[in-house]
Amino acid sequence: MVLLVLRRLVQTALILLGVAAITFLLLYALPADPARMIAGRSATAQTVANIRRELGLDQPLLVQFWAYLQGIAHGDLGRSYAQKTDVGSLIAARIPATLVLMAAGILLEVVLGLTFGIIAALRRGGVIDRAVMMASFIGVSAPQFVVALLLLYVFAVTLGWFPMSGFGTPAHVVLPAMTLGILGAGWYARMVRSAMIDVLNQDYVRTARAKGLSSARIILRHALPNAMLPIIAMIGIDIGQFMGGVVVVEAVYGWPGIGQLAWQAIQQVDIPIIMGVTLVSALAIVLGNLVADTIAPLIDPRIRAR
Amino acid sequence: MFKSWLRNTTIATVLALAPLPSFAQDTPQQGGDIIVTYKDDIATLDPAIGYDWVNWSMIKSLYSRLMDYEPGTANLVPSLAETFEVSDDGLTYTFKLRKGVKFTNGREVVASDVKYSIERAVNPKTQGPGAGFFGAIKGFEDVTAGKTTTLEGITAPDDSTVTFHLSRPDATFLHVLAINFASVVPHEAVEAAGGDFGKKPVGSGTFILKDWTIGQHLVFERNPDYFVKDMPHIDKFTVEVGQEPLVALLRLQKGEVDIAGDGIPPAKFLEIKNSADGPKMIVDGQQLQTGYITLNTKVKPLDNLKVRQALNMAINKDRITRILNGRATAASQPLPPLMPGYDKSFTGYAYDVEKAKALLAEAGFPTGFETVLYSTNTDPQPRIAQAVQQDLAAVGVKAEVRALAQANVIAAGGTEGEAPMIWSGGMAWIADFPDPSNFYGPILGCSGAVAGGWNWSWYCNQDIDKRAVAADSMSDPAKVAERSATWGKIFTDIMADAPWIPLINERRVVAKSLRMGGADNIYIDPTRVINYDAIYVKQ
C-alpha cells in the first residue's frame, strides 16, 4: 500500500516534468514576443530589448527552462508578465473558489446521479427509466454555456432567487454548481443504472430478497457498495477536471476560479501564468486519480487482495 | 419629467465642452457608492507599468501628476504643480509644486518625489512600457542603457521646485508630464511593497485603494484630503472583475451595476438601444482613435503610389460603419476629429470605383493583382476585413484575408516585407495624449519603420520627418494653435503619399445605470476613458 503510493508519487513527478517541458516548448515556440506585448505600442526598440533582457528571454531556451525548473523546486512559479506579481499567489488566491465550486459541483452530480440512476435501475424499461435516460442524454450532450445561461436567465434574471454573478455567499454557489451538477449527473446516472442492474441480478441480492430484507436495505447495504467503484473512479477524474478550472461556467457566473485566470492569461500571452495553471491542473488530475485509487481498496477488499 | 428632459437635452447640447454653471440641475452631487464591472482582472495599478484602457483610468485617479486635464476635455491644466515656466528656447521647464499636498500614507509630496517617480518609470529594471515618452529629458540614454539610475535632466533645488532640462525642444512635454507614467509615487511605499507596488498602490490622487481581493473586486474610496475641493464626487467605487459583458449588462438593467465597463456586446446593442431606457443607459462617445489599413510601401505593387491611391478610393467606408451598427464614422485622414490639428475641410480620397480602376490601369494593373490583408481574429475585425476584401475585388484586387491572433499580426507588421496590408482593428492607434504628434512617430515616422516597430506601412518620408521635428520644437505655449495647424498639414500631406487607408473613427460605448449623472464626455473622457473624479450619482 505504502509502496503503491510511493510509486504513484514518483510517477506523478515524472508526469509533471513532462507536462512542464511540453508546455514550455509550445509556449515559447509561439511567434508572439512577450516582451513586445508587455512593452506596448509606444515602446522604443531599446525599451523592448531591455524588457526582454530583464525577463531573461534573451537566454537560450534550455537555460530558461532550467531556470524555471529550479524555481519550481523552490516553490516559485515565476512572475506574471502582465500583472507583475507572483504566479503562485495569483493561483493561490483562486484556489478557495475553485475548491468550493468543485466540492459543490461533485456533490450535486453524485447526489442527482445516484438518485436517478437507482430509480431508473429499479424501474428498468419503464416510463421513468426512459425519461431519466433521455434527460441524462441531454445532460451529457448539452454545451455548458447553454445550460449556464439558461439557469442564469431563469433563476437569477427572471425569478431573482439567486445572485447573477460573483462569489462569497452560499447563494452564489448554487447556480454554477447546479450547472456542473446537471451536466455531470447524466454521466453518473447512466453509470449507476448499468452497475445497479448488473448487481441487482446477482445471486446474493436474490438471496437477500429471499431472506425478506426491505428493498431499501438491499439497495443501500448490498447493491450500492458494489456499484460504487466506477463512481469513485469518476469522482477522481472530476476532481482533476474541476481543479483545472471550468472556464465556461466560471466566465458566465463571474466565478473567481482557476479557469478564469487561465483564460485571461492565454489572451494576454502571459506565459508564466499559463505554465503555472497547466502544472497545477496536471497535478490535480494526477492527485485526483491517486486519491480514487487509494480509496477503492478500502471499499472493495477484492482490490486490496490483488 | 420636464427636469429630466431638460437634463438630457442639456447633456446632448453640451458636447465636449466645459459644464455650463447656469444649469443648476447639472451640479454634481456629493456622495454615493457605485459598482463598475470588467471582464478581465485589473493587471496592475503601478503607474510606471499599467498601460491598458481599463487600469489607465484607475491609475489616473489613484495618483496625481504635475499636469492634468480638465475633465472631459483635452485642455491641459497644472495639477500637482501650482505654476510652471518654460524657457524661451523650450529646453527648461520649471514647476512650483502645490504646498501641503499629501500622499495617502500621510507624508507630504516634495519635489524629489517627482524626480524619483520619473526615474523609476525610465529605469529598465522597472520594465515599464512608457520609458520612451521621457526621451527628451537630458540623461535619458544613460538611464536606459543602465549606466546610471538618475536622470541628470531633473533637479529638485528645494522641496517645492522641480526643474527639467531637455536635450531637445519637445512641445509635447507638458502632455508627457500628464500621462500616467509621470504619476508621482512615494519611494518608501514602493520599497515597502517589495516589487508588488502594482497591488499595493499609494498615491496622492482622488481615490485610495482600500481592498483588492484578487480575481473578485477592488474597492476605491474617496481621498478625503485630496487637494482640490469637492473632488471627487462619489464616496466609493467597487470594481467587480470577471464579469461577462452580457451578464454585466443584465445586472445593469436590474440596477445591480452602475457602469458596465466593457460596454455592450455587439449582439445586444440594437436591443438595448431600442429599449425604453436604452438611450439613457448608452454612452456613446468619440475617442482619439483612428482605424486604418496600412499599405506596405516596401511590398510590390503597393510601392507604387498610384496603386495606393487607387486602393484608397476603392473602399466603401460607410458600409463598414454600418457593420458596426453606426458605432463609427468614416475617416478621411490619420488624425481623429477630436484631435487638435484635425482638418475638417480635408476630404481625402472619395469612394469612387471607376476612378480607382482607371488609376490601377494607369499604374499598369488593368486587371488588378493579388495581395494579402491581415486582421486580428476577434469579432468584428474579420467581418470588416471581409468587407474590405469585397470592395477590393470590385476593382480587381484579389486580397486573401489572414485573420490571426493579435500578437501574430503585430509580429507580421513589424517584419520588413512581410504583410502587404494590415487592418488595424483591435490594435488601432488610440492617442496616449491629445496631441497630434502622438499619431506620427511610432506609426508613420521613419523611427517606427524598423523591425518590431508599429509603422506597418514602412513609410519613411525624410521631408515629412524634418517637418515633424520642426513642429515638435514649437514649444512656445503662445504658438499652440499654429503648431496644431502645422501638424494638421503634415497629416493631410502624408495622405498624398497614401501610406494608409484611414478607414473609420470608432466610438467607444459604455453602459451606465439611470442613476449615474454627468455628461457623456466624462464617461468617455478623451484622456482617461472613465473619469472617476468627475462622475456622480444623481439623488
Image (cartoon, rainbow, N blue to C red):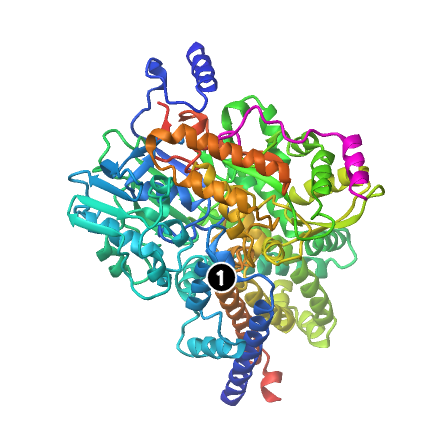
Q: In this view, does B169 lie to the left or right of A272?
A: left
Q: Position of residue B425 (x, y in %)?
A: 61, 43
Q: Is residue A33 left or right of residue A196?
A: left
B246 is higher (above) or lower (below) than A263: above
Which residue is at the front of the view, A271 or A279?
A: A271
Quadrant of the drawing holding the N terminus of chain B: top left
Q: What amino acid type should be assigned to the residue bearing mark 1?
A: Ala
Which residue is at the front of the view, A234 or B439?
A: B439
Which residue is at the front of the view, B154 or A298?
A: B154
B187 is higher (above) or lower (below) than B464: below
Q: Where is residue A76 in the image (x, y as percent from the top left)?
A: 41, 72
| Secondary structure of residue under mark 1 | helix
Query: Which residue is painted at 33% across and 32% down in the image?
Result: B477
Residue A163: tell me if it is visible.
no
- Chain letter of the residue beneath label 1 in the structure image: A
Which residue is at the front of the view, B92 or B255?
A: B92
**Residue holding disc 1:** A35
Q: What is the chief secondary structure element of the magenta stretch?
A: loop
A171 is higher (above) or lower (below) than B354: below
What segment carries the magenta color? Answer: B336-364
Residue B386: tell me if it is visible.
yes
Q: Is residue B206 left or right of residue B463?
A: left
Res A122 → quadrant: bottom right
Query: Which residue is painted at 46% across and 33% down in the image?
Result: B524
Q: Where is residue A57 in the image (x, y as percent from the top left)?
A: 49, 69
Query: Which residue is painted at 41% across and 44% down in the image?
Result: B56
